[in-house]
Amino acid sequence: MANQPKNRPLSPSEFFVDGRSERPLVENAVARGALVDDELFLPKDSNNFPLPVDLKLLERGEERYKIFCSPCHGLQGDGNGMVAVRGMKRPPSYHQDRLRQAANGYLYDNITNGFGQMLGYSAEIPPRDRWAIIAYIRALQLSRNAKAADLPAELREKLNQGATPAAKPSGTNDSRGGSF
């Protein structure tokens, strides 16, 4: 392999008629990583979502979130992932008002280009997976801030059936022998 024929940059070549080893670019060639998927491009302040959000997309988002996001942001999005536990700067919680109210385009831009200490994931996470992750993040946020009134009637009824009345303190001793 070390002795194979090759051309070094700016070296002459007898193979080509013009004597150059470098070749002109092919017309309309796109450099690696420079192709932008226009269908999925959104400005930072856009709240549009370019994909239909369904169970399959949320499951894909959960899978990708656990791989790429949970090491820093934690499984629940609290910002207490293993990286933070081991002494690095803690990332923000997705449950802060600032991030709950942030536009989808803002989250997409942060995943793509990075923010603060977070590096961009444009080379590692394809655009569709970035949107899947955003859908999953929105589901995590909703899991902590949903109102029962927003649920469909049949789910609200199920929720009410599963509710148990709060236990009243009995004034009895605890397991260590003391009283409450």
Image (cartoon, helix red, strand yellow):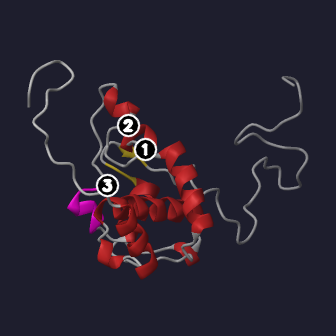
Three-letter code for the amino acid on which mark 2 is drawn: Gly
Spatial CA span between label 1 and label 2: 7 Å
Quarter of the image where the N terminus is located: top right
Residue 124 relative to residue 165: left or right: right
User: Label 3, on which residue?
Assistant: 94
At x 47%, y 60%, the residue is 136
> Label 3's element?
loop
Three-letter code for the amino acid on which mark 1 is drawn: Leu
Q: Position of residue 113 (x, y in %)?
A: 42, 55
Quarter of the image where the C terminus is located: top left
User: Label 2, on which residue?
Assistant: 81
- Label 1 with label 2: CB-CB less than 8 Å: yes
Magenta span:
95-101
Residue 115 relative to residue 6: left or right: left
User: Label 1, on which residue?
Assistant: 75
Q: Position of residue 151 (x, y in %)?
A: 38, 76
Q: Earlier in the sequence, mark 1 or mark 2?
A: 1
At x 28%, y 61%, the residue is 99
